[in-house]
Image (cartoon, grey):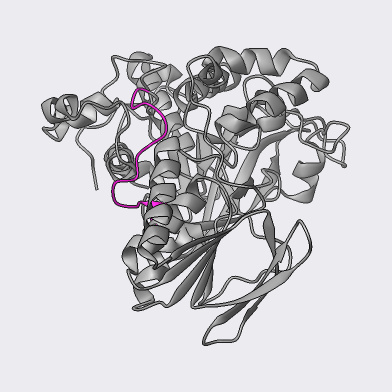
Amino acid sequence: MTVAPTNTPDHPRAERAADGVEVVDVLGIGFGPSNLALAVALAERNAAAPPDERLSYRFVERQERFGWHRGMLLEDATMQISYLKDLVTLRNPASPFTFLAYLHDRDRLVDFINYGSAFPTRLEFHDYLEWAAARFANVVEYGAEVTEVVPVEGEGTVELAEVVGFRSDSGPVRIRARNVVLAPGLTPNVPRGVTLGPRVWHNRDLLHLAPQLRTAARCAVVGAGQSAAETVDYLHRTYPDAEVHAVFARYGYSPADDSSFANRIFDPAAVDDFYAAPDPVKKMIMGYHANTNYSVVDPDLITELYRRHYHERVAGRERLRFHNVSRVADVVDTGERVELAVESLIDGARDVLTADVVVYATGYRPTDPLWLLDPALAAACTRDDAGRPEVRRDYRLTTGATPQGRPVDVGLFVQGATEHTHGITSTLLSTVAVRAGEIAAALAGATTPAPARLPAWETA
């Protein structure tokens, strides 16, 4: 399939090694918003560069199609960042990939202006991301699960990395690259000992699994952050006869600090400050401003849930119940129901709840960016005193030599797991456009230009 050049920027044809394996300048693992923003940055760079300086690039994504937190695309749930923090505006506001360009293409620009908010719904922003991702369908290998990244030795050095994967419908996938950008995303976090199943969920699967629960007498939600509050709200509205029990260690939901000065922690310049700061200052900054993002809830949603709870108490039919300063001590899925032991953190008293479903809205943790690397390649990545990967300001992993003494020349870049070096925005959308531009610039400087060839957009 050939994509019309008017719809896609110039993209050089990939090379082939002697054994027929495709070789590209840049290979991205994962195709969520971070690597999508990188694709845009590379495409725009290529469009402005002479043919012999354009970079070939491909992406590998395990999902069958583009998707970003589909299980939490709740009706009327809004983004918590401005639409201007899209894939590209902070880097290039004149780009054809801006959210405003998307609105114009969808014939909704005037309607959005009249909407009167800088915060689109999550559904609309997801549609924007899909709209942008569709432009790159011919350079993304969807439905391919990467199993490892192995070094390819040249003349005494590791010059390439081979990404090995598997497609259930067509078998092995092998692509070699001069640079690999690891964007493995986030891993759902559940307490130790909890096993997810038909009646014990993580909130990421809420909209996928909830339709299977035709009726519910009692639901429980564990967690105190935005996703937990949204899940409580959703279940309470979806099952009008069910009790919904919220369990969290706090006394109540804490409001997110989205004040103007606090929001400067999400500025691109804050990344420079954080990266240059000594470790004690990094820790202090994270402590001061954790309430801008972690375990906090939009104040309007807090108000809505409290009012709903109060009105139910007045009416004498309390469906929305809160177990604060408490924890789940034990959870047992019997097959037909879930037995939940809720323990007070104050006096240790326990109540046993019988629920139709328990949803753990307990957040995510960054995926180790090195877990896919071959042991020799992973060993070449240096770590700090805490055992964390050392990451340069341009998001390139610091590498030395393999255990066999081969210097690693292949570029290994990471998106997402850099909070310890780059700050709170590492897993957020706030600086995704600027970060993509910085990585694209580093790739252009670190990559030997491929031989001149005519630009083309084709699937392999």
Indicate the position of residue 164 as horizontal and vertical percent values.
59, 54
Dominant secondary structure (helix, strand or loop) of the stretch shown in magenta: loop
Q: Please tell me which residue is depicted at 54% across the width and 23% down the height of the picture.
A: 439
Q: Is residue 316 above or below residue 336?
A: above
Q: Is residue 224 visible?
A: yes
Position of residue 38 in the picture relative to residue 384 (left or right): left
Position of residue 64 in the picture relative to residue 287 (left or right): left
**Magenta stretch encompasses residue 71:** yes
The image quarter in which residue 180 lies: top right
Q: Is residue 169 visible?
A: no
306 or 85, nearer to the observer: 306
Q: Which residues are magenta?
A: 69-84
Indicate the position of residue 408 as horizontal and vertical percent values.
75, 32
Q: Please tell me which residue is depicted at 34% across the width and 14% down the height of the picture.
A: 48
403 or 419, nearer to the observer: 419
341 or 176, nearer to the observer: 341
Q: How many marks?
A: 0
Indicate the position of residue 250 as horizontal and vertical percent values.
65, 48
**Magenta stretch encompasses residue 14:** no
Indicate the position of residue 71 as horizontal and vertical percent values.
41, 57
The image quarter in which residue 273 lies: top right
Q: Is residue 35 above or below residue 165?
A: above
